[in-house]
Each structure stands twice: as C-alpha cells, then as structure tokens.
Image: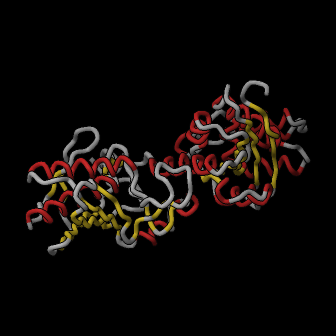
C-alpha cells in the first residue's frame, strides 16, 4: 500500500494533550514521580497513553508537557508543546484553571466561557477535572488543584487562527469535544464559524457577512462598513454556516464569494471545496440565457476554461450573469434556513473585488 492509499491517521486534540500533561503533573506533585507514558480517559471511553516531552517539579508545583500529534490533519497546532503546571489548591476550592503563556483569555461575550476566563473549553476542563479526581482518589487526598495550561509559542500560532476575531487574546484555545482529531474534518474551522456567530449574536448584531475568502471578505466589509465581529470566515463551509444560523438565527445574513464559489452554490452545492464538485459550465450557460444573452454566448461559455472566463464573456456582452448566479445561489441558501427568521443576501465579487452580482435580502421565514 502506498502513502496515498493508506487510511488517514487520527490525532489528538489540544484538550486531550492538556489532560495527559495535567494528570502527569498532579501525580508528580503528590508522589514525586511522573508517570511516563500517562494514560487518560476520553469522552468516548477510549484510554490512550502519551509520552511526556518535558517535566519539572519542586515542592510547590509540577509541570509536564506533551507534544500534540494531530495525525494526518493539517492542524496549526500539530507538533505544539502543550504544558500543564499543577499547584495545590485551597482546601475545598476544587479545580481551578489559569491561562499560562500561549493560551488565550476570553474578552467577548457569546463564547462557551464568560469574559475573563482562560480559553480552555468546557469539555477539556471536564476531562482534566476527571483525570485529577482519578489521581486524587487513588492517593486518598482532596481534589483541590490549580491548573495552569500553556502552549509553547502559542501566541504566534494563534495569529494563524481566528481567535483574535472571536475576542480570544494572548494565545490559543484549548479545544476538543471527543478528544480525537479526525483528519480533514476541519473541526477547528467549523468551531470558529460557530463561535463567530455566537459572538455576533451576543453583541446584538442584526447583520453578519459570511465570506468564502479574504478578498470577498474585504469587499463585503467595504460594501457595508461592517465591524469585524460581523465577519464570518466560512471558507468552503457555506452549508455548515447556514445550518448553524438556522438554529442560532441572525436577522440578516450576507453570503459573499467569488464567481466560481458562488456558481457552485448556485448549482446546489453546500460544500464549495474543489473535491466536492466543479463549476458546471453548462449551468452557467443556462444562467446566461436566463439573463438575456445572445444566441451564441451559451456555447462560448460552455467552452470556457474557467468560471472567471465565462463571466468575462458575459460582461463583454453586458449580460448580468452575476445577478442570475446570485439569485440561484440565494435559493440554495434559503432552503437551508427555511422557516426561520433569517433573511439572506448573496453578493458575487470578481478577483479585483468588484461587485458583479447580487440577490437582495429575501426572507426565509414566515412573513413578519
């Protein structure tokens, strides 16, 4: 079996790595010895073991580090050193969490944690608390501990994520729901989309713009003068974005993208990645006819190399192909949020950021 045929290797979330490091550090604090490897329990009941990359201890605290292995997923935190420092807590205080170097702090409402809290998500917190309780029970001591989680070079890594836009400052988030990273599930991106919608709702915004890329995001922000908290970097995940908006409604949602991505949406695709489907030039040709093209334009569009070339041919004739694509894309989007108080607009931009198509807001829910 060659590398291309082998199954993709799963990895471990930052939350799982933090849990392993926390359990090892607490054990060393109580016993003076670090378990290596250290075994942890995942939410699904699996019990993987992790080697320790670094250890340090004195009478007051113990620190352990685990290098994150994201498997075959192109995760920004793959190879990062996740550190846990554990200190004895006040009697009766239970488990408390602190953000160490490289872990961010929540500064905006709408996230699973209130402002001022370290960006260590609820499931990883529960995993760590359960691991600490296991160790405390084994040594017949109270489970009172202060846990400080850090990530080496975490602030620099966070600059490659959407944390800043979500109001998480100073570093990364400690994430995970199952403890396992599934390759190419893009779970972290979907998580960021969901949290972006949550932050916008908590800020009381009634209009958000979800864009497929940085160029369309800049263009739609300039079009409306939207604040950063209203901008959702959805990438190819238009379906995932709209499904979340259906259950967490925002009154007005603008979907923004380039000609190729919006053509795919017009074709009915909700995942716009190239692996999920290509631009159908026959469909674009039919859109051009609906937009009032000459008799020979559809054939020339069918023979085009790219969606951009097809749009250029239509523009040369003054045919509003972009509006027709936007209307069809809007219909795809409205089906997802049907029955909810959400109005959807679709805007299409060319590579220069010029608006080349628009379907004005249409309401997907019952009449107001």
- Dividing the picture into quadrants, the one containing residue 96 is bottom left
- In the picture, measured across the screen, residue 13 lies left or right of residue 248, that is left
- In the picture, measured across the screen, residue 163 lies left or right of residue 342, that is left
> For this rendering, which residue is in front, 330 or 221?
221
> For this rendering, which residue is in front, 348 or 202?
202
- In the picture, measured across the screen, residue 107 lies left or right of residue 17, that is right
Q: How many labels does the image show?
A: 0
> For this rendering, which residue is in front, 43 or 357?
43
Q: Position of residue 8 (x, y in %)?
A: 33, 47
Q: Where is residue 216 in the image (x, y as percent from the top left)?
A: 70, 56
Q: Look at the image and tell me whether residue 307 can be seen.
A: no
- Dividing the picture into quadrants, the one containing residue 35 is bottom left
- Dividing the picture into quadrants, the one containing residue 55 is bottom left
Q: Look at the image and tell me whether residue 333 can be seen.
A: yes
Residue drawn at the location 79% of the way across and 27% of the way down:
368
Residue drawn at the location 61% of the way across and 48% of the way down:
202
Residue drawn at the location 54% of the way across and 40% of the way down:
276
Residue drawn at the location 26% of the way across and 47% of the way down:
1
Q: Where is residue 181 in the image (x, y as percent from the top left)?
A: 35, 49
Q: In this view, does 113 lie above or below 63?
A: above
């Amino acid at each position: 079996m060659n590398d291309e045929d082998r199954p993709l290797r799963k990895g471990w979330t930052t939350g799982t790595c933090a849990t392993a490091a926390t359990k090892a550090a607490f054990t060393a604090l109580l016993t003076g010895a670090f378990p290596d490897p250290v075994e942890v329990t995942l939410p699904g009941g699996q019990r993987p073991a992790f080697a320790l990359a670094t250890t340090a201890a004195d009478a007051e605290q113990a620190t352990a580090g685990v290098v994150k292995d994201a498997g075959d997923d192109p995760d920004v935190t793959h190879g990062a050193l996740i550190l846990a420092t554990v200190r004895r807590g006040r009697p009766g205080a239970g488990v408390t969490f602190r953000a160490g170097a490289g872990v961010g702090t929540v500064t905006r409402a709408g996230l699973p944690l209130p402002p001022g809290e370290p960006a260590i998500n609820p499931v990883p917190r529960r995993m760590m608390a359960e691991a600490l309780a296991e160790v405390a029970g084994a040594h017949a001591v109270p489970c009172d501990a202060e846990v400080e989680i850090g990530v080496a070079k975490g602030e620099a890594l966070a600059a490659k994520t959407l944390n800043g836009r979500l109001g998480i400052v100073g570093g990364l988030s400690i994430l995970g729901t199952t403890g396992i990273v599934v390759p190419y599930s893009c779970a972290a991106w979907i998580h960021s989309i969901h949290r972006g919608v949550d932050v916008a709702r908590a800020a009381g915004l009634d209009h958000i713009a979800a864009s497929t890329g940085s160029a369309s995001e800049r263009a739609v922000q300039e079009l409306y003068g939207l604040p950063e908290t209203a901008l959702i970097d959805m990438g190819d995940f238009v379906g995932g974005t709209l499904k979340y908006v259906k259950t967490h409604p925002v009154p007005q949602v603008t979907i923004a993208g380039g000609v190729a991505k919006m053509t795919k949406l017009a074709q009915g695709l909700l995942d716009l990645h190239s692996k999920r489907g290509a631009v159908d030039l026959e469909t674009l040709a039919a859109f051009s006819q609906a937009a009032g093209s000459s008799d020979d334009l559809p054939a020339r569009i069918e023979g085009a190399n790219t969606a951009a070339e097809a749009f250029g041919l239509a523009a040369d004739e003054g045919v509003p192909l972009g509006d027709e694509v936007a209307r069809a894309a809007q219909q795809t989007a409205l089906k997802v949020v049907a029955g909810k108080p959400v109005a959807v607009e679709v805007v299409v931009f060319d590579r220069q950021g010029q608006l080349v198509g628009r379907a004005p807001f249409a309401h997907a829910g019952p009449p107001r």
